[in-house]
Image (tube, rainbow, N blue to C red):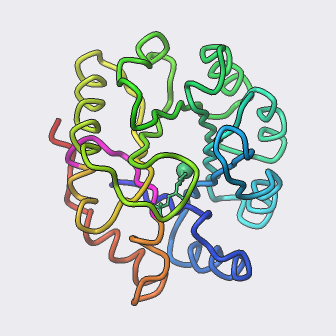
Amino acid sequence: MVINAPSLANINLLDFGKQVNELVEAGVQFFHIDLMDGHYVKNLCFPISVVKDLKQKYPNCLAEVHMMVDNPMDYIETLKQYGADYVAFHCDSTSFVRRTITTIQAAGMKAGVVLNPSQRIDTIEPYANLLDYIIFMSVEPGFAGQKFLPGSMERLAELARFRKGNGYDFKILVDGGVNYGIAADCVRNGADMLVTGIYMVFEQPDGIIGACDRFRNTLKDIECCI
Ligand code: DX5
Ligand code: ZN
């Protein structure tokens, strides 16, 4: 079953605790947390301590951190201390991709790299065998609520074929603009996890709990066909 990974960046901060609690009540166990530094992307999102706050209150949930920062190595020790479970960084944000992956894993966390829409899939070839997961961007990083970019489905299929053809076992998390019209196709084309935002779980007429049920019902019998 594909994992529902709500992006906390979509929550109105004045309503943050209440909506996170609703997500947990709706059965969500995996949270996508965007960290931005105002340099790698021209935006800011949460303080890194949101990871600690989430894990203290909901220790059984998994915190998946999407770093949109320069020098990702600088954050790994703190993320470990705060209890992060999955940590990914953009593959063009450091000259030391391999070392960053192995440092995340040596700290006991799952490691991923993030592929932007303009990056070739085979960019990841030199270290693909090390990866626990890939965040596949279907929007340009930096802002929540954008539209799924044209051509992203074909690129996702290309990534899934690259994985299968080379016998890699990394998981694929699709991030950006996923909606109910394309969610099933994302799974058919290789997604194991979907970042869900305002088109999937937030600001929905049936509320967070209804929308999370809809996510499960819509995708329960869908499988990757690549
Ligand atoms: C964009 C972020 C996404 C975003 C996804 O920089 O990486 O995680 O919050 O949410 P939607 O799909 O609503 O844009
Ligand atoms: Zn993200």
Q: In the image, what residue occupies the spot 17% across and 35% down?
A: 226
Q: Say whether residue 166 is left or right of residue 221.
A: right
In the drawing, does residue 112 fall left or right of residue 214?
Answer: right
* Residue at the image point whose x is 51% and y is 71% from the top: 27
Towards the viewer: 96 or 70: 70
* Residue furthest to the front: 42
Front residue of 147 and 210: 147
Q: Is residue 167 magenta?
A: no
- Quick check: 131 above or below 4? above
**Foreground of the two, 1 or 38:** 38
| Residue 165 in which image quadrant | top left
Residue under the point 51% across and 18% down: 130
The x, y position of residue 106, in whole percent, is 71, 22
Check the picture and name the quadrant holding the N terminus: bottom left
**Magenta residue check for 192:** yes
Total number of numbered labels? 0
- Name the residue rendered at 55%, 25% in the picture: 91
Magenta region: which residues? 188-196
Q: Is residue 157 above or below residue 149?
A: above
Give the camera-side residue of 63 and 37.
37
Looking at the image, which residue sits at the far bottom? 205
Residue 44 position in % (x across, y down): 72, 54
Percent x, y for residue 28? Answer: 52, 67
